[in-house]
């Protein structure tokens, strides 16, 4: 799905998500549904990595939007480096450290909906944690199945719009 279409879908109201006819000059396939689910995992001395992966499906796009990383109960005052392993625009696997948490100076970090495309692996590169990672798993489903009724309704709406011409405003005499 194009980035522009994804950005445009973010502004659709709850009601229009079920049946989006188009946005400005952008034609969006109908119907579009957006679902969002809470995501969370914990990295520790026992669990050094966690992989978030989904089944690939046609007409479905998955996004993992990270909101926060934080040290949880039982964390030591040591550097806990969290690394994300994902794919770049060339589909090459890259590893990037996203947080260095320490109980005495930075026990949590807000990631402000840092968006990643699955599959994504989180690794505790150093430290013993536990580090809690939270966010949202967003699923955008686009169905190209448009029933005949909907097609006829769209055609009738277009005809009605063409039948209502815009008339010029009447001049009012005597007023300045």
Image (tube, rainbow, N blue to C red):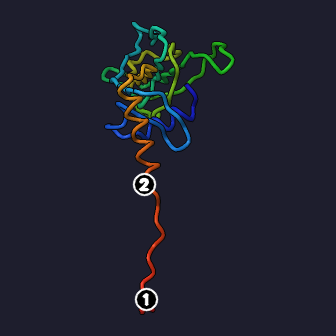
- Please state if 43 lies on the left or on the right of 114 as rendered: left
User: 98 above or below 12?
Assistant: above
Q: CA distance from mark 2 to mark 1?
A: 27 Å
Which label was assigned to residue 173?
A: 1
At horizontal 43% and vertical 15% (from top left) the residue drawn is 128
Picture disc at residue 99 = none
Position of the N terminus, as image quadrant, is top right
Residue 5 visible in rendering:
yes
Res 42 quadrant in image: top left
Q: Residues within 10 Å of mark 2 (few under 14, many from 20)?
A: few
**Is residue 103 visible from the viewing direction of this image?**
no
Locate residue 120, reporting x and y percent.
51, 15
Which image quarter holds the C terminus? bottom left
Q: Nearer the viewer, residue 112 or 164?
A: 164
Q: Is residue 115 above or below residue 165?
A: above
The residue lying at 43 percent from left, 24 percent from top is: 140
> Is 73 displayed left or right of 105 in the figure?
left
Q: Identify the secondary structure beneath mark 2.
A: loop
Q: Which mark is residue 164?
A: 2
Name the residue at 53% across, 33% down: 5
Instruction: Choose between 50 and 5: the one closer to the eye.
Output: 5
Query: Going by the picture, which residue comes out furthest to the front?
Result: 163
**Residue 95 percent coordinates (x, y):** 61, 17
- Front residue of 99 and 169: 169
């Amino acid at each position: 799905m194009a980035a522009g279409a994804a950005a445009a879908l973010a502004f659709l109201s709850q009601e229009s998500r079920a049946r989006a006819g188009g946005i400005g000059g952008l034609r969006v396939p109908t119907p579009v549904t957006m679902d969002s689910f809470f995501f969370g995992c914990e990295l520790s001395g026992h669990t050094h990595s966690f992989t978030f992966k989904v089944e690939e499906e046609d007409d479905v796009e998955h996004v993992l939007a990270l909101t926060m990383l934080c040290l949880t109960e039982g964390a030591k005052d040591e550097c806990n480096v969290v690394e994300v392993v994902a794919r770049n625009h060339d589909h090459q696997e890259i590893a990037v450290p996203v947080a260095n948490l320490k109980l005495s100076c930075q026990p949590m970090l807000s990631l402000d909906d840092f968006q990643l495309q699955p599959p994504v692996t989180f690794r505790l590169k150093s430290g013993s944690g536990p580090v809690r990672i939270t966010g949202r798993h967003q699923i955008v489903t686009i169905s190209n199945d448009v029933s005949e009724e909907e097609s006829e309704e769209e055609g009738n709406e277009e005809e009605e719009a063409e039948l209502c011409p815009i008339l010029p405003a009447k001049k009012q005499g005597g007023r300045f």
